[in-house]
Amino acid sequence: MSKDFNDPKLAINRVYTRKGDAGKTSLVGGQKVSKSSLRICTYGEVDELNAFVGAARQTIMEDPDRGRLDELATILLRLQHELFNLGSVLATRPEDLHPRQPRIVLEDVTRLEHEIDTFNEDLPSLRSFVLPGGSRLNTDLHVCRTVCRRVERLMTELNVEEGVDEASMAWINRLSDAFFVWSRWAVHVRGHEELLWQPNAG
């Protein structure tokens, strides 16, 4: 499926509407559901991940000597848009999806795999597990990785209960791998030392 999605058609004039005071919210198809439902919790976690990706990108943008990190900043911005696409499809029951509704497609998975391979080529082999640290950006990206894994766990549960499309499931799995590779690359490209797990430290 090539990307030919509908542009957003909304006007946000008020921040609060009072419609959710009873703990209910509406899906894209119009159904009222509890704000604690699995579907709402899942795309809520996607929103949280998007915020952390934005924070990681901002760390790069505020670096006056970012150099090669600009390449990663460009990818992170694209991912923020793709995470919104993922949220769109998760906020919709499978039977209500519109053909041109924004979503994750298999092309997104393939591109992410290519980026993982490309960035990983610059990295030395690991001889231990790594800990978050070594730079601010490294830590930001590890936070993204762990939140992404949480999203994947919820999506897996939602897939069992109601179904989630194949491309979205594959993409979220690759994305956490990508954050791991980028966290290592962020340290390596600056010549910093990775923080390796030492079982007998302390």
Image (tube, rainbow, N blue to C red):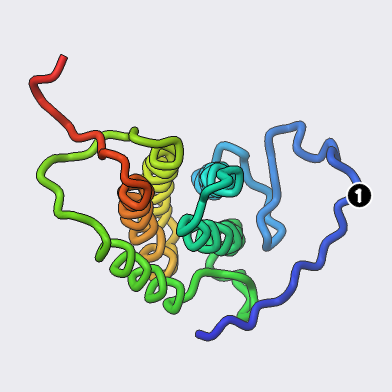
Three-letter code for the amino acid on which mark 1 is drawn = Asn
Tell whether 149 sits left or right of 17.
Answer: left
Which sits in the foreground, 90 or 57? 57
Q: Is residue 104 above or below residue 178?
A: below
Q: Is residue 10 above or below residue 22?
A: below
Q: Is residue 1 above or below residue 189?
A: below
Q: Residue furthest bottom?
A: 2
Q: Residue 95: where, in percent of width, then height?
A: 56, 70
Screen quadrant of the C terminus:
top left
**Looking at the image, which residue is at 34% across and 61% down?**
174
Q: Which residue is mark 1?
A: 13
Q: Residue 186: where, in percent of width, then height?
A: 38, 49
Tell whether 180 sits left or right of 2.
Answer: left
Q: Is residue 50 visible?
A: no
Q: Residue 146 sits in which quadrant?
A: top left
Tell whether 100 sits left or right of 46.
Answer: right
**Looking at the image, which residue is at 56% across and 64% down?**
78
Tell whether 61 sits left or right of 163.
Answer: right
Q: Residue 70: where, in percent of width, then height?
A: 52, 59
Q: Residue furthest right?
A: 13
Q: Residue furthest top?
A: 202
**SS of the residue under disc 1:** loop
